[in-house]
C-alpha cells in the first residue's frame, strides 16, 4: 500500500506562518514513548496511538528523535540512511500516516536531522574507508595523516564529547599510509566535511525529501558543530571542550552560517510555517548573544535555551538568564525558547532535588549526591509554571508532565549510552532519562507496550503512581498541572504577546507581568512570601490558594 504525501492535510493545522513563535513542542523520544508491536522498543505506530493524549495535553507540535536506520551506537544519532525509517520503528508509510493523523489532531511534526556526522555504517563512510587517502570519497569526511613517526599519533589533541580522543585510525587502504578520521562523538559517528559541495547538496536533498513527505520542520543536531577550522589546531591544554569560547576550532565556527542560509531558503520554498530549531551550545559566556547570530532572519527560526536548562534553582541566576535571553534575541527578531529537560540531561525533577554543582545537568558521575525527590518535584512544578509563563516557545520532554525523575539505579550491564564505556565507567551516561514512560496499570510495562512485553530499559516499580492513568483527573497531579497550564497558555489573552515586565518583589522571588494583568510569581526563597490580596488566582503549583506563597511554589494570577 502506498500512502500519498500529507500536504493536503496540512490545512488541518492551519497555515499559520508564525505558529512556532509561541508554540509548546513535546519531545517524543521514540524508543521510549509507546510500543505498539510489543518488542520492547517504542515505534511510530505507538506514537500514532497516543496522538489524542498529546492533543488533550495541549501541545502544538511534536519533535521526534531520530527514526532512521541506524546501528544504534548512540541511540539513533548515528544515521545509516537518511531517507528511510529504522525497521524497529516502522516504515515510511507509517511516518506518512503519523504526519497526516497528527495534522488531523492539530499537531505539527518536527523531525531530527543529524548533519554533523553519519553512522560508520553509512555507505559513504564505508566507501571512504575502502578508498585511498585524498580520494573524493574521503573528502566527504575529515581524514588526516597522523602525527609522529609512522603517523601513529592522532592528528591533533581534540577530545571526543563522549570521552577519549576524537580520532580513530583506519586500516591502510589503496596502498597509502593508514589515516585517522575525526569523530567529535563516538567512533561510530564520523564527522562530515561541510566544506564539501557533495555533502551540502546531499543534505539539501534530504531536507526536501522530508518536507515533501509532510514534515513541518526539523530539530538540528549539534547545529553549531558543522564547520571546523581547516587547519585543525590543537586545543589549548586547559580548554573546556564542552564550552565554546571565541575562535573555538570546532564549536561555533562561522562557516556554519552559510549552510543554514541555504536551508532557510529551502524551508521558505515550502511555506513560511516550516521551521528549524537548532541544538546549539551551551555557548559559554555571552552565550545568548552568540546564539542570536544563528537566529538572524535568514538563518534558523529558534535554538534551544541551554542556559535556562542549566541554571540553578536560584532567583537571581534565573532572572539573569531570562534577561540575557530576551535582549539579544529581540534584536534579531527571534522568539526566546525555554527548556528544562531532554534526552541528554538528568531529568529536572531529580536535578532540582540536589545541591547545584555547575554543569550538573550533563553530569552523570557514578558517585552522585542523593536527590531529595519531594523537593525536586515541588520545584519542578513551580519551574513548569515559570517556563510556561515566559514569552516565546517552550519544549517539554516526554515524562516531565508525569513528574518522572531520573532512573539512577539501572543495572550496569543494561547501560547503552556510549559514554559509559568511553569514560571508563566514570559516567553512567544518559540512559536514566530515557526509560520507557508509564501510561497505565500497576506494574511494568505500565502500558508502554502490550502486557508481557519487556521494555528495552527496565521501569522502576515506583512508577505506578506516575502513570497517565493514575494522574488523570487528579487535580493535584503533575499531569493536571501541565494540562491546566497549557490550556490557560492557549486561551488567556495575557499570554498571547511577547512582552514581559519585571515587578518589584522580595529577595529570592521572581514576579513578572505579561499582558492583560497576568502575573507569574515564583518563590525560590526559603520563606513564604505574601501575594497581593486583590488578585484572581488562575493556577498554583502547590494546588492551594493560600497567602503567603510557600517556598518552591509558583502562582499565576491576575492582579488588581
Ligand atoms: C546531540 C544529541 C545527543 C547525541 C549527540 C551526537 O547532542 O542530542 O543525544 O548523542 O548530539 O549526535
Image (cartoon, rainbow, N blue to C red):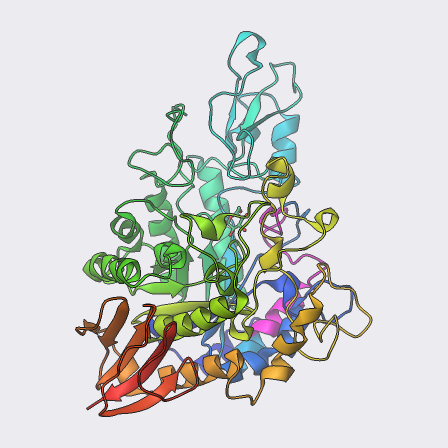
- On the image, which quarter does residue 240 sit in? top left
Q: Is residue 540 visible?
A: yes
Residue at the spot 54% in from the left edge and 72% down from the top edge: 403
Q: Position of residue 193 (x, y in %)?
A: 47, 35
Q: Residue furthest right?
A: 452
Vertical order, 411 against 32 (above or below): above
Vertical order, 115 against 265 (above or below): above
Q: Relative to the observer, which residue lies in front, 290 or 538?
A: 538
Residue 98 is covered by the magenta coloring = yes
Q: Quadrant of the C terminus?
A: bottom left
Residue at the spot 64% in from the left edge and 64% down from the top edge: 32
Q: Is residue 3 visible?
A: no
Q: Position of residue 333 (x, y in %)?
A: 23, 63
Residue 400 is covered by the magenta coloring = no
Residue at the spot 58% in from the left edge and 62% down from the top edge: 29
Q: Quadrant of the N terminus?
A: bottom right
The overriding secondary structure of the stretch rendered in magenta is loop
Range drawn in magenta: 74-99
Describe residue 114's horizontal placement relative to residue 414 as left or right: left
Amino acid at each position: 500500500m502506498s500512502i500519498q504525501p500529507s500536504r493536503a492535510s496540512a490545512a488541518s493545522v492551519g497555515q499559520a506562518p508564525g505558529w512556532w513563535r509561541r508554540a509548546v513542542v513535546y519531545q517524543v523520544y521514540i524508543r521510549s514513548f509507546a510500543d505498539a508491536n510489543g518488542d520492547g522498543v517504542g515505534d511510530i505506530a505507538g506514537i500514532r496511538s497516543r496522538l489524542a493524549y498529546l492533543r488533550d495535553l495541549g501541545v502544538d507540535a511534536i519533535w521526534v528523535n531520530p527514526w532512521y536506520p541506524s546501528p544504534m551506537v548512540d541511540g539513533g544519532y548515528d544515521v545509516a540512511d537518511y531517507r528511510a525509517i529504522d525497521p524497529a520503528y516502522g516504515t515510511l508509510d507509517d511516518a506518512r500516516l503519523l504526519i497526516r493523523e497528527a495534522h488531523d489532531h492539530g499537531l505539527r511534526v518536527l523531525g531530527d536531522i543529524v548533519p554533523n556526522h553519519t553512522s560508520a555504517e553509512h555507505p559513504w563512510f564505508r566507501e571512504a574507508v575502502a578508498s585511498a587517502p585524498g580520494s573524493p570519497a574521503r573528502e566527504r569526511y575529515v581524514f588526516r595523516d597522523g602525527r609522529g613517526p609512522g603517523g601513529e599519533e592522532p592528528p591533533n589533541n581534540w577530545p571526543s564529547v563522549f570521552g577519549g580522543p576524537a580520532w580513530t585510525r583506519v586500516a591502510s587502504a589503496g596502498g597509502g599510509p593508514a589515516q585517522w578520521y575525526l569523530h567529535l562523538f563516538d567512533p561510530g559517528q564520523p564527522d562530515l566535511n561541510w566544506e564539501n559541495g557533495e555533502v551540502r547538496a546531499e543534505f539539501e536533498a534530504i531536507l526536501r525529501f522530508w518536507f515533501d513527505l509532510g514534515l513541518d520542520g526539523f530539530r538540528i543536531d549539534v547545529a553549531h558543530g558543522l564547520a571546523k577550522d581547516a587547519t585543525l589546531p590543537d586545543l589549548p591544554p586547559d580548554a573546556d571542550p564542552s564550552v565554546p569560547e571565541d575562535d573555538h576550532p570546532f564549536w561555533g565556527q562561522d562557516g556554519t552560517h552559510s549552510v543554514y542560509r541555504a536551508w532557510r531558503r529551502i524551508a521558505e520554498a515550502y511555506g513560511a510555517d516550516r521551521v528549524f530549531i537548532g541544538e546549539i551550545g551551551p555557548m559559554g559566556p555571552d552565550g545568548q548573544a552568540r546564539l542570536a547570530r544563528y537566529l538572524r532572519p535568514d538563518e534558523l527560526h529558534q535554538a534551544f535555551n541551554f542556559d535556562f536548562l542549566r541554571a540553578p534553582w536560584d532567583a537571581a541566576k534565573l532572572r539573569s538568564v531570562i534577561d540575557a535571553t530576551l535582549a539579544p534575541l529581540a534584536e534579531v527578531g527571534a522568539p526566546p525558547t525555554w527548556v528544562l529537560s531532554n534526552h541528554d540531561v538528568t531529568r529536572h525533577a531529580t536535578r532540582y532535588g540536589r545541591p547545584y554543582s555547575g554543569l550538573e545537568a550533563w553530569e552523570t558521575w557514578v558517585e552522585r549526591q542523593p536527590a531529595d525527590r519531594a523537593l525536586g518535584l515541588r520545584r519542578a512544578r513551580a519551574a513548569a509554571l515559570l517556563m510556561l509563563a515566559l514569552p516565546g516557545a517552550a519544549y517539554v520532554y516526554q515524562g516531565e508532565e508525569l513528574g518522572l525523575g531520573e532512573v539512577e539505579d539501572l543495572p550496569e550491564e543494561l547501560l547503552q549510552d556510549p559514554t559509559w564505556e568511553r569514560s571508563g565507567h566514570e559516567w553512567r551516561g544518559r540512559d536514566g532519562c530515557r526509560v520507557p514512560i508509564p501510561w497505565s496499570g500497576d506494574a511494568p510495562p505500565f502500558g508502554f507496550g502490550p502486557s508481557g512485553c519487556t521494555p528495552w530499559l527496565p521501569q522502576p516499580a515506583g512508577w505506578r503512581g506516575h502513570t497517565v492513568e493514575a494522574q488523570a483527573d487528579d487535580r493535584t497531579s503533575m499531569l493536571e498541572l501541565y494540562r491546566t497550564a497549557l490550556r490557560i497558555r492557549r486561551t488567556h489573552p495575557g499570554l498571547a504577546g511577547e512582552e514581559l515586565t519585571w515587578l518589584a518583589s522580595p529577595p529570592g522571588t521572581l514576579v513578572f507581568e505579561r499582558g492583560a494583568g497576568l502575573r507569574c510569581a515564583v518563590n525560590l526563597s526559603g520563606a513564604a512570601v505574601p501575594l497581593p490580596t486583590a488578585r484572581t488566582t488562575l493556577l498554583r503549583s502547590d494546588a492551594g490558594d493560600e497567602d503567603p506563597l510557600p517556598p518552591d511554589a509558583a502562582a499565576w494570577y491576575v492582579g488588581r
